[in-house]
Image (cartoon, rainbow, N blue to C red):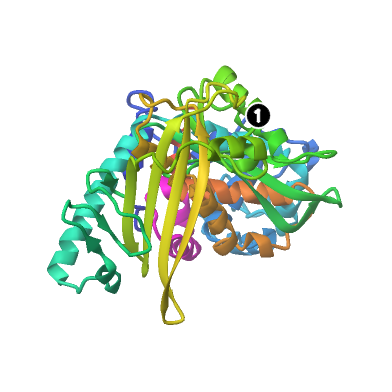
Amino acid sequence: MTAPVSSSWLAGCIRRHLPAGAVPDPVPVRAVLEGRLTDTRKARGKRHPLPSLVSVLIAGVAAALSGPLAVAQAAAGWDQDVLAAHGCRISPRTGLRVAPSASMLDRLGKLLDPDEFEAALSAALAAMALDPAIPAAYAAHRAGGRHAREEKQEKRKRKPPAAESFRGERGDGWFRPHPAHPWLDPAATGDGGHVPARPAVAVDGKERKLAKAGGRKKVHLLAAVTHVPGLVIAQDKVAKSGKANEVTHFRPLLEPLPLDGVLVTSDAMQATRDNAFFLRKAKKAHYLWPILGNQPNLNAQLNALPWETTPITAATSEISRGRIETRTIRVLPAPDGTGFQDAARAVLIERYTTSKKKGQWRTRCEAVLYITSLAAEDAPPEDLLAHVRSHWRVEHTHWLRDVIWKEDKSLIRTGNAPQIWSALANLVITLFRIHGVTSYTAETRRCAQDPRHALQFLDLTGLSPG
């Protein structure tokens, strides 16, 4: 009997979307996919139902298996009850469940429409992932975890970090964590893990190295990931045909998502006037975007604002992983003539990082200008500072796909298969996060050791209202 997966703070938020008295289906992933995928196989070639094949692949990806052959070899050793849970076919000759072959799983990339597949896997989670109750629940969960860690540290009576020796204080109560960092007002300095109440989505792209679609086009995928706790709710392939980039796929990616009141963050490439108009008018959403050298006129316009005389309105100061990090934010009204729809405020964020390299402490400073449609009554400065930091949750998702699932080293490189396998990895990461998994490597090993463990993760997709 396999140990049940741990309950998470997020599960309660998701269950709010279930009808009263509803119970998750034991094999919900097939129910979710049923009717949403077009099966192009001829009648004589349909041995395993299409959702069953996808269910087997998801279990394989949850075990960090590298391709169709590895998944088929693992599935061949599964017990009959596990094969039945995935909906595998019964052999008329033996009367036993039979796992799909490696060739069948390999052909799946040609049989599935990648856009239809992406929508079936991730779009069903969008409404739940953007529930306004999730940030508040995560903030409470994080506060409880921080309190437990502080109590544990007090009991252990560990020595303070060596980096604390740089801290300086003034008579008026102001402090600086390092001589190369700015002086900070304790009243304006908050928690580095502050969680804003407004739901937010980060948009960013990732290219699968060495993978090409149609023989020539590189496989470049644009994804939307929630800031809290990092659920993938959409993904689209860039440059399906002709010349295209991430900017042209920003609207198609976000068009089907319920973004009313949601903040959208991205890198400087997506910070365009057309995208701002689309978010504000079509989606009733907000934006917070960096303005860099790709828009020299606007960058110069924001840079000319009186930042030197503008006080720091919020800051964070942390010592972790052997480094000292300070983040500060200054906010001013957005100047006229930016061209961005409903531009409300200009933001300057400065980051100071001091770490020890080759026996010496070195400090690196960087400053980035932002523009946002969030007015003062919509988000205080500490929320803006937290949103900018949380944008990198999407990069953590990409990092997991590279490090745990070895995506950039994958031999799956042609046709629709690279996009489909990336979609499967996104779904597994989302399910892991819903269950509160913190060690992804350890969880993939558990799924590899016991295939029943992966079935418990698939159960949560039955919480989808779709």
Q: Residue at x 16, y 55 (%)?
A: 171
Q: Which residue is mark 1?
A: 251
* Magenta residue check for 440: yes
| Left or right of residue 270, residue 327 in this image | left
User: Looking at the image, which residue sits at the far bottom?
Assistant: 359
**Furthest-top residue in this view:** 281
Where, by quadrant of the figure, is residue 1 drawn?
Answer: bottom left
Indicate the amino acid at tag 1. Answer: Arg
Task: Choose top left, top right, bottom left or bottom right for residue 331.
Answer: top left
| Label 1 Cα neighbours within 10 Å, binned few <14 / some 14-19 / many ≥20 | some
Would residue 436 be counted in the magenta stretch?
yes
The answer to whether one can see residue 148 in this image is yes
Of 350 and 237, which appears nearest the observer? Answer: 350
Horizontal side of 359 relative to 208 (left or right) equals: left
Q: Which residues are magenta?
A: 433-456
Secondary structure that dominates the magenta span: helix
43 on left or right of 319: right
How far from the left and from the top, in percent, is residue 322?
A: 36, 70
**Is 379 rendered above or below residue 420?**
above
Q: Residue at x 65, y 36 (%)?
A: 297
Please provide percent x and percent y for residue 104.
73, 52
**Residue 140 rendering spot, x and y as whole percentages:** 26, 42
Residue in the image at 60% along x and 30% along y: 254
Residue 89 placement (x, y as % from top left)? 63, 47
Label 1 element class? helix
Residue at the spot x=22%, y=44% of the render? 187
Using the image as rendered, state which of residue 455 and residue 67 is in the foreground. 67
Above or below, comparing residue 305 to residue 316 in the picture: above
Q: Is residue 30 visible?
A: no
